[in-house]
Image: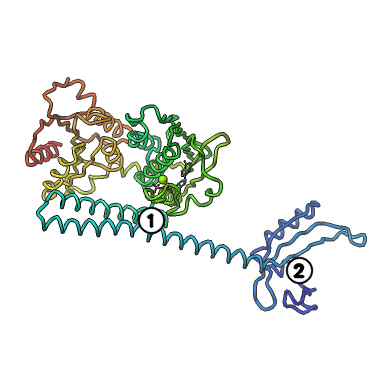
Amino acid sequence: MACDRFGYTRAELVRKSIKDLAGSIQRDLIADMGQQIQHSETVQFELEIQAGNGKRIPYEFHARRIIYKTRPAVLSVARDLSVRKKMEETLIKTERLSAVGEMASGVAHNFNNLLQVIMGAGEAALTKLSTGEIMKCREALESLIDASQRGADIVRRIKDFTLAKTNDTDKGKVFDLGELIIDAVQLTKPLWANPAAAHKYRLNYIRPLWGFVRGNPSELYEVLVNLIKNALEAMPAGGVVTIATENRDGRLYLSVTDTGDGVAKENLRRIFQPFFTTKGKRSSGLGLSSSYGIIKRHRGELTVLNRRNRGAVFTIMLPLAALTDQDKTSKTADNGDFPDAKIKFLMIDDEINILKMMKMFFEDTDVVISTAPTPEKGLLAIRNDRFDVILCDLGMDNMNGLEVGARAMEYARRSGHPKTPFLLYTGLDQKLEPAELEKCGVDSMVKKPVSCAELLRIVQKLIRKQ
Ligand SMILES: Nc1ncnc2c1ncn2[C@@H]1O[C@H](COP(=O)(O)OP(=O)(O)OP(=O)(O)O)[C@@H](O)[C@H]1O
Ligand SMILES: [Mg+2]
């Protein structure tokens, strides 16, 4: 029977040892198992056997030492795994196919809904245009643009989990994840510190050790926001979200814990699948799958556990990074490499219309403008990019311009970059103490209203002075 299975004649087979049958690649494994058997252990291992017809057949071996006719010998039982392996492969293929099927129907479902909005809004705009109702036409066009943006957002998130993006996180910059968490906590504040539902949620942030990681801060930031949003959404009646970090064995662990009902057992396997959602039409079900893709690209892991008492814990593991010499030099090189580069200007204001207008004006100048509609988004931009000049509104909700200035200065100090000139602008005739302005890193005040052309002159003058 062994001759049939292995495809050798009896004479050939008795001359062959297990090492000959397995081939040289598996020699170490066999030697290792041999030693264990010598120590009277029963071992179990898998080997591929080279059959007489050249095929390799997977086998599972159980082996132990025995005494046979008063002499030491090895008793081993081998089981052919071909059928089992085939079945496993088929199962994996079927699972993959069904995941692809689910994903395709998720894409179709989401895009059909968006296309419906786009088509409807386009038609409505045309009708309103012909009846001369310009404001209604504008409204329709705005919802058309909004739906297109949502579509673009879905495509971006799909790219995140399909790993279609190039794996360039190794070349990414080194940054402090602890600071990024502070930004994520700040940005999600309207969700958990909603004045309409005061004291509904509490967010605990257990202050971390500094943890430097390498990669793309805005992608990791998105993962954090996804996890915080999920935690809040899991507690519709309110509860506590706890964010904690820990450095262990060269790795950084970040957990987001909530006090909701946890993930239903039957969903545990599916929550990282794209488009899987239990939240109905409003949710795309892409939060965890895109987060998973992002973390994998950063050579990390994203896992979930249900807590014994109540709630879920999502844990991100990321390898801690060490600053290389190249990172240190690139910090000082940044803009110096491009003496002719355009001036990079960041404008932070919660008046969207002002930002829109400025954007339009600056498009045709030598100044590249970026805009941020909230102080938190402004701080995120400052962390992720280098600007030549920053202009920030003084009176905004959540955080005023002075605070933004102070934090921008602190970022620069920590990261070793030179401080970016910071302009504060305000329409109030309020006198601010020079000492306070200096403490918050404000270089100069700009009075509202300021024309775009005037602002351009101020920015250019500041750069020339530098
Ligand atoms: N903290 C949590 N507690 C309980 N269930 C959770 C938690 N986080 C995620 N889930 C489950 O995982 C599913 C998938 O989450 P995911 O973030 O991918 O999508 P979503 O939140 O439903 O939609 P989106 O993030 O696109 O708005 C959720 O619908 C929910 O059932
Ligand atoms: Mg989500």
Residue 455, percent from left and from top: 10, 38
Answer left or right for 133 relative to 213: left
Residue 279, percent from left and from top: 42, 47
Labels 2, 1: front one: 1
Q: Secondary structure at mark 1?
A: helix
The image quadrant in which ligand 2 is located = top left
Q: Nearer the viewer, residue 59 or 372?
A: 372
- Distance (Cα) linking label 2 and label 1: 52 Å
Residues packed near mark 2 inside 10 Å, few (<14), some (14 to 19) or many (20 plus): few
Kindly check if marks 2 and 1 are in contact, taking CB atoms under 8 A apart as contact: no
Q: Amino acid at mark 2?
A: Ser
Q: Is residue 49 visible?
A: yes
Vertical relation: 376 (above or below) 10:
above
Name the residue rendered at 44%, 48% in the picture: 288
Q: Give residue 17's mark.
A: 2
Q: Quadrant of residue 442?
A: top left
- The single residue placed furthest to the right in the displayed view is 70
Answer left or right for 260 relative to 354: right
Q: Which residue is mark 1?
A: 158
Answer left or right for 179 relative to 68: left
Name the residue rendered at 68%, 72% in the picture: 50
Q: Nearer the viewer, residue 389 or 463?
A: 389
Q: Amino acid at mark 1?
A: Ile
Task: Look at the image and tell me in which quarter the N terminus lies.
Answer: bottom right
**First along the sequence among labels 2 and 1:** 2
Residue 228, percent from left and from top: 41, 39
Vertical relation: 182 (above or below) 147:
above
Residue 422, percent from left and from top: 19, 33
Q: Nearer the viewer, residue 449 or 384?
A: 449
